[in-house]
Amino acid sequence: MSEDEYHKVSNETLDALVEKLEAYVEDKDVEGGDVEYSQGVLTVKLGKYGTFVINKQTPNRQIWLSSPVSGPFRFDYVNGRWNYNRDGRDLVRQLEQEIGALVGTALHLE
């Protein structure tokens, strides 16, 4: 994937995540919750539940996730999805499962 293609798909992904996660944190009134996006780094603060950091890694053409639940992951763009190459897990599904379980209500990012 070219660098231009990478920026296009990663920016689209992160922009969509920002929109959905901001609405979720506000709608669920997560105490201490906040969503910030700046220079390719998306920070999702969930108060007592911890902080998720999702960021672009341009040299590797990846999106990295740091989760307070499961630790670090590196996702590659394959067949229209951001997948973790070790076990095939999907970035969006990972976030839905972990954040939904922490907050106690379903999260739908797509």
Image (cartoon, rainbow, N blue to C red):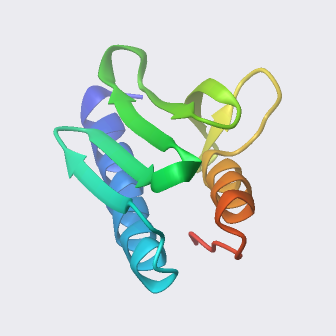
Q: How many marks?
A: 0
- Residue that extends furthest to the top in the rendered view of this protein: 59
Question: Relative to 27, is 55 above or below?
Answer: above
Report the side of 60 relative to 103 (left or right).
left
**Which residue occupies 31% across, 23% down?**
58
- Residue that extends furthest to the left in the rendered view of this protein: 39
Q: Indicate the quadrant where residue 86 lies.
A: top right
- Residue that extends furthest to the right in the rendered view of this protein: 87
Q: Position of residue 34 (x, y in %)?
A: 33, 60
Q: Quadrant of the C terminus?
A: bottom right
Report the side of 102 relative to 41 (left or right).
right
**Which residue occupies 69% across, 45% down?**
90
Q: Position of residue 56 (x, y in %)?
A: 35, 32
Question: Relative to 31, is 59 above or below?
Answer: above
Question: Relative to 96, is 104 above or below?
Answer: below
78 vs 44, nearest the viewer: 44
**Which residue occupies 68% across, 37% down?**
69
Q: Position of residue 79 (x, y in %)?
A: 64, 45
Q: Indicate the quadrant where residue 42 lies.
A: top left
Q: Quadrant of the N terminus?
A: top left
**Which residue occupies 48% across, 42% down?**
52
Q: Position of residue 59 (x, y in %)?
A: 33, 14
108 vs 57, nearest the viewer: 108
